[in-house]
C-alpha cells in the first residue's frame, strides 16, 4: 500500500481552501495529492484539471502525457459513479486524439475501442472507416442510430450511409440515406430546416440510387431536387438560416470518395461522410496532397489531357472546400473560380456529357450554398437534361 504523506495532504487542503486564485498547475498538484486519500471527491476534479491543462499545452508529448494521466485517473473513479463514464470517455477522446496526432495509430485505436466499450462508439467507427473497414463501421453506426444516439440526425445518418456504400452495400446505403431525406422533407415543409439542405440531400440521394442501379428512382429524385431549386430561385428560403456550409462541404466531399485511393490500414483515408471528425494525421495527409495535385493539373493542362484534368481539378476543389469551406467570409468570391473552371473544362469535352453534368451539378450545389439560387437552378436544369438524355 502506498504511504500517504500527511504533510503534503495538509498543504494541499490549505492551498485549495485559501482565498487566493490558484494557477492550474497548483490545482492539479493539489488534486493529485488529495485523490490518494479522498478518491471519490478528488479524482473527478483531477480528471477535469488535467484535461484543462492538456488543452493549453503546445508540446504534443506533454499533451499526450497529461491526457494519459487523465485517463488513468478516470479509470480509478469508483465504478457506478454518476459521471465516471462521461469523464472516462472525455479523457479517452483527448488521449486518442493526441496519439493519432503523433502517428501512434495502433494505440489510438485501442483507446477508441475503450471509448466504445464505455458507450461512445462514434470515434471507433471513424477510425474503422479510415482503415477501409466500412462494414464494421456501419454496424457501429446502425447500433448507435437504432439506440437513438442521436436519432436520425444528419451527421449520424450520412455517416452510416457512407460506410454502407463504402462496403459495397449500395441498396442498403440508399435506403438509409432515403430515411434521412424523408425526415428532411418533413422538416422543410414545417420550415424547420433549409430548403438548400434538402436540395443537397436529394442530389446526393440521386447519385447513390444511380450507383445502386436504381435508374428510375434516381431520375425521380433529380426532378424533385430541380423542383426545390426552382422554388428557391423563385422565392428564396422561407426563413433566414445561419451558416449551413458544413452540410454542403460534407456531401460534396463524400461525392468524391470514389475518385480517391482505397482506404486501408497501411494507407488510411478520411472517413468521408462525417462532419470532419477525422484523425489529425489522416486529415493532414489528405490535405497535404494539394500541391501534388496542383502540379499534376498543370502538367495535364500543358499536355491537353482534358478528361483527366477535369477529374483532378474536382479533387482539388474538394480539398479546398474541406480546408476552408465552412468559413462564410467572401465564400462565393473565394470558391466560384474553382467551379467555373470545372464547368469550362468540361464544356471542352463535347463527347463526355457525364463529366459536364457532374461539373454543372457541383457548381449548382455550390451556388445554392452561396445563396445565388437562380444560376444554381439554371446549372442543375442543364445537368438534369444531360443525364436524362443519355
Image (cartoon, rainbow, N blue to C red):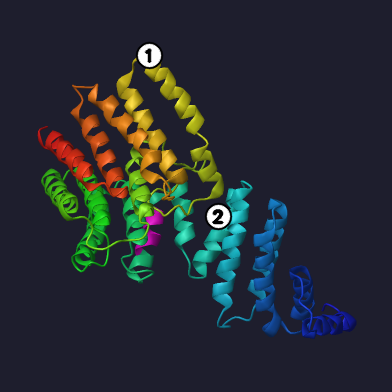
Residue at coordinates 15% horizontally, 40% vertically from top-left?
Answer: 381
In the figure, is residue 252 to the left or right of 204?
right
The circle drawn on residue 109 is: 2
Quarter in which the N terminus is drawn: bottom right
Residue at coordinates 22% horizontally, 57% vertically from top-left?
Answer: 178
In the figure, is residue 81 to the left or right of 176?
right
The circle drawn on residue 303 is: 1
Q: Main secondary structure of the magenta part?
A: helix
In the figure, is residue 378 to the left or right of 327?
left
Q: Is residue 123 above or below residue 100?
A: below
Q: Is residue 377 above or below residue 86?
A: above
Give the secondary structure at mark 1.
Answer: helix
Q: Is residue 135 above or below residue 52?
A: above
Q: Report which quarter residue 182 is drawn in.
A: bottom left
Residue at coordinates 48% horizontally, 70% vertically from top-left?
Answer: 119
Residue stretch rendered in magenta on the structure: 136-142
Q: Give the CA distance from mark 2 to mark 1.
A: 44 Å
User: 3 or 95: which is nearer to us?
Assistant: 95
> Residue pushed farthest right?
7
Give the secondary structure at mark 2.
Answer: helix
The circle drawn on residue 169 is: none
Quarter in which the C terminus is drawn: top left
Residue 167 visible somewhere in the drawing: no
Amino acid at each position: 500500500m502506498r504511504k500517504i504523506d500527511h504533510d503534503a495532504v495538509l498543504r494541499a487542503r490549505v492551498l485549495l481552501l485559501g482565498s487566493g486564485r490558484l494557477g492550474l498547475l497548483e490545482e492539479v498538484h493539489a488534486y493529485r495529492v488529495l485523490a490518494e486519500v479522498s478518491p471519490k471527491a478528488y479524482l473527478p476534479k483531477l480528471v477535469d484539471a488535467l484535461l484543462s491543462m492538456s488543452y493549453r499545452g503546445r508540446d504534443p508529448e506533454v499533451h499526450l502525457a497529461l491526457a494519459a494521466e487523465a485517463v488513468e485517473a478516470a479509470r480509478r473513479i469508483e465504478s457506478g459513479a454518476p459521471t465516471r463514464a462521461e469523464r472516462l470517455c472525455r479523457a479517452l477522446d483527448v488521449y486518442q486524439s493526441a496519439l493519432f496526432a503523433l502517428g501512434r495509430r495502433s494505440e489510438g485505436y485501442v483507446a477508441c475501442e475503450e471509448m466504445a466499450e464505455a458507450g461512445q462508439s462514434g470515434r471507433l467507427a471513424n477510425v474503422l472507416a479510415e482503415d477501409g473497414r466500412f462494414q464494421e463501421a456501419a454496424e457501429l453506426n446502425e447500433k448507435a442510430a437504432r439506440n437513438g444516439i442521436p436519432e436520425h440526425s444528419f451527421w449520424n445518418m450520412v455517416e452510416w450511409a457512407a460506410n454502407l456504400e463504402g462496403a459495397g452495400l449500395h441498396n442498403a446505403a440508399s435506403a438509409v440515406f432515403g430515411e434521412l431525406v424523408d425526415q428532411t422533407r418533413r422538416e422543410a415543409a414545417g420550415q424547420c430546416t433549409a430548403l438548400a439542405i434538402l436540395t443537397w440531400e436529394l442530389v446526393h440521394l440521386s447519385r447513390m440510387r444511380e450507383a445502386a442501379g436504381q435508374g428510375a428512382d434516381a431520375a425521380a429524385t433529380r426532378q424533385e431536387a430541380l423542383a426545390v431549386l426552382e422554388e428557391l430561385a423563385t422565392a428564396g428560403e422561407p426563413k433566414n438560416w445561419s451558416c449551413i456550409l458544413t452540410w454542403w462541404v460534407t456531401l460534396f466531399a463524400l461525392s468524391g470518395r470514389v475518385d480517391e485511393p482505397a482506404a486501408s490500414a497501411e494507407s488510411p483515408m478520411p472517413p468521408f461522410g462525417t462532419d470532419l471528425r477525422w484523425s489529425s494525421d489522416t486529415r493532414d495527409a489528405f490535405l497535404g496532397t494539394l500541391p501534388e495535385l496542383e502540379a499534376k493539373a498543370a502538367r495535364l493542362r500543358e499536355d491537353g489531357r482534358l478528361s483527366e484534368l477535369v477529374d483532378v481539378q474536382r479533387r482539388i476543389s474538394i480539398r479546398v472546400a474541406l480546408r476552408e469551406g465552412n468559413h462564410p467570409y467572401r465564400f462565393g468570391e473565394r470558391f466560384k473560380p474553382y467551379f467555373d473552371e470545372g464547368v469550362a473544362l468540361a464544356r471542352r469535352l463535347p463527347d463526355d456529357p457525364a463529366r459536364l453534368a457532374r461539373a454543372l451539378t457541383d457548381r449548382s450545389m455550390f451556388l445554392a450554398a452561396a445563396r445565388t439560387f437562380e444560376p444554381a437552378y439554371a446549372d442543375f436544369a442543364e445537368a438534369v437534361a444531360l443525364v436524362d438524355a443519355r
